[in-house]
Image (cartoon, rainbow, N blue to C red):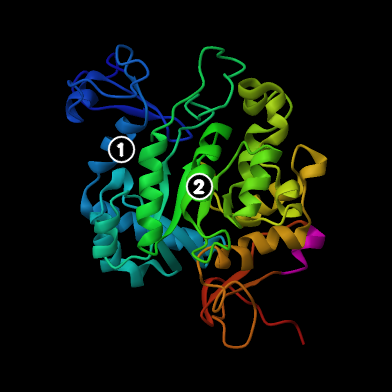
Amino acid sequence: LDGISKNLPILLRREDGHSLYMNRAARRWLLFDQPIEHASDPISGRFNELAVERMQERVPVELRKEAFVTAGRDLLSKGVTGAAVMIGDAGHLEDVEIYREIATKVGIETVLFPQNPEVEKVCELELSRLGGCILIDGSFGSRTAALRKPYTDAPGNMGILYFSNSELANLVKCANEAGLQMTFHAIGDEAVEQIIAAYERFIDPANPLRHRIEHAELIPPDLIERARDLNLVLGVQPVFETTWGQEGGMYAKRLGERRRWTNPFRSLLDAGLRLAAGSDAPITAPDPAQGIKAFLNHPIDKERITPLEAIAAYTSKGAYGMHLEDRIGSVRVGYSADLLVFDDDPLETGDLKPQAVIRRGKLVAGSIQEPPR
């Protein structure tokens, strides 16, 4: 990268968002002359999560506002009328106020999950949730997801846990006592077990606050059972599986035989867990059509779910996971009139792109043509 420019900061971010390469100018721009924790290879210019966070801090306020509005329009065009928003990258809560200033322009129903572990600050902002991409671990692609046993293709590496057991337990205890719904990014089985263990210590097993885990990508049967016993909501991303779960794909390379228990959607539903589907955008496209197809085409046949179950994960179950099931996520009298219009039965044709999107009874994307008389 220095060969391209020695003066212009250049950063190449990995598709999973958990690592990046940068030239020396970018390192100076991000004040990386100082040692940095979790740097994979500072000599070559490769850094992990903390570098990504510092990069995001530097995005100007007006550009952030523009990005929020643009994202809302893009989501509406894909038929998304509501979303959980992981806000405050790198733990900085100024994005909450920035978002509130332009929320009415975004155009979709949003629930904010501030990515900040400081419970008092979250409560001061009168928010009722905490978490999102508060990282318990990293990702499989970067080999930073925390595993019980080493990576198949990197035998000396078991990934990274970003919290000690006591740190995470204290955070869960404080947030639960404050009445905040929590969700944490946990991908590897060691990370999933760590957050489940913290929940087991402090939350009501009936889970009235609807605490969640985001991703839970590697969740073998013993952890499925423990998650079920806590009535946890799992925020899942079905396109992960069709992207990385194919025979010989990234999951197989990183995990070997453990790949059998990546994103086991059928097993999770059969255990009684609720799945709230999403995309983890920009990791995969925020497009429910792609997600529904991924649910139906899981590389492991026995882990596929039905079309109606897939739709529910994007509608009623997603609404439940945000405490909004009393007004969105279903077509009922008194609910928000958020509707998608198709030319034909999308489950018959396989074409899941809506012809029109209606939000609160108003056409906001596409068009509706009168049938011929």
Q: Position of residue 307 (x, y in %)?
A: 76, 59
User: Which residue is painted at 74% across and 42% down in the image?
Assistant: 298
User: Which residue is painted at 30% across and 30% down in the image?
Assistant: 51
Tell me which label, 2 or 1, sits earlier in the chain.
1
Check the image and report above or below for 165 versus 270: above
Q: Find out whether the residues at labels 2 and 1 contact each other: C-beta distance under 8 Å.
A: no
Q: Residues within 10 Å of mark 1 (few under 14, many from 20)?
A: some
Residue beneath disc 2: 280
Q: Which residues are magenta?
A: 343-349
> Can residue 207 be seen?
yes
Residue beneath disc 1: 53
Toward which corner of the image does residue 354 lie, by quadrant? Answer: bottom right
The amino acid on which the numbered mark 2 sits, given as a three-letter code, is Asp
Q: Position of residue 312 (x, y in %)?
A: 67, 64
> Can residue 281 be seen?
no
Check the image and report above or below for 372 versus 135: below
Residue farthest along the front direction in this orientation: 201
Q: Position of residue 113 (x, y in %)?
A: 39, 57
Nearest the camera: 115 or 119? Answer: 119
Any magenta on residue 205? no
Nearest the camera: 193 or 69? Answer: 193
